[in-house]
Image: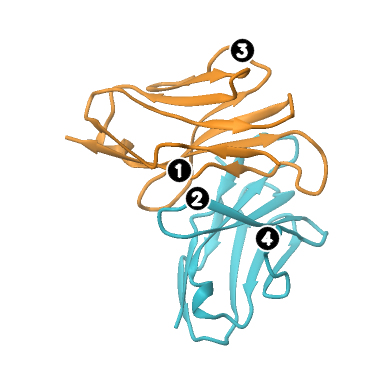
Chain colours: A orange, B cyan
Amino acid sequence: AQTVTQSQPEMSVQEAETVTLSCTYDTSESDYYLFWYKQPPSRQMILVIRQEAYKQQNATENRFSVNFQKAAKSFSLKISDSQLGDAAMYFCAYRDNAGGTSYGKLTFGQGTILTVHP
Amino acid sequence: GAVVSQHPSWVICKSGTSVKIECRSLDFQATTMFWYRQFPKQSLMLMATSNEGSKATYEQGVEKDKFLINHASLTLSTLTVTSAHPEDSSFYICSARRRAYYGYTFGSGTRLTVV
């Protein structure tokens, strides 16, 4: 079974600084997607960024970028120029393209609570 | 963009009663709906997966007779917590997926409190 591990329960960063959230995963599949989701206090899940495993180029979305190391099964999220609105719980998630009744199922990591200090 | 409307956003019910939570996809057809449960400051735990017109597939350890999931149409899925007890109090979130699309649209969640 696929597992996703976020080893940092909590992280903090100063406003305007950069922070990196870690994520590792375990899978025997070669075709899969990886995601970072943000869950602010409202608890609405918001997609931050996604990465297709077949793409070697790291995904970027404005201030958010990932470091995808497929061989190491690592998928870290870097937040640059941190803003107060970035404070939230961040989840790393995995989804493969294998068939079966749970096709498309997301497996989430434990989450990392990010605090942004003014 | 794609929107999933989840209702109610919060509900308080008495122990022993049933509660129904609805998720509607407003501008797309949700071929698959996922239902999650989340405790405070913890991760989302998948409860079940439902495909339109099919029986739901429940994760190990989830009581299918207690958590009834119906996905009768491509725009509506419901989760009914039957004979609710205080230990069922939690935050429930639905997530919809469209055919041939990698992404997911999450509902805003329902906070259930059983007293």
> Residue B71's quadrant in the figure?
bottom right
Cα–Cα span, label 3 and label 2: 28 Å
Q: Amino acid at mark 2?
A: Ser
Q: Where B101 sits versus B62, above or below?
A: above
Within 10 Å of the Cα at label 3, are there few (<14), some (14-19), or many (20+) other Cα atoms? few
> In terms of sequence position, does the residue under pointer 3 or pointer 1 come before the other?
3
Between A105 and A12, the residue placed more toward the observer is A12
Q: Are marks 2 and 1 in contact (CB under 8 Å)?
A: yes
Whole-percent x, y for residue B17 in the image: 57, 86
Tell me the amino acid under the disc marked 4: Leu
Contact (CB < 8 A) between labels 3 and 1? no
Q: Secondary structure at mark 4?
A: strand
Indicate which disc residue B76 carries.
4
Label 2 sits on residue = B43
Q: Judge depth for marks 3 and 2 and give the one in front.
A: 2
**Subunit under mark 4:** B
Q: Which mark is residue A56?
A: 3
**Are the two marked residues, 3 and 2, in contact with CB atoms closer than 8 angstroms?**
no
Residue with the mark numbered 1: A111
SS type, badge 1: loop
Left or right relative to A17: residue A79:
right
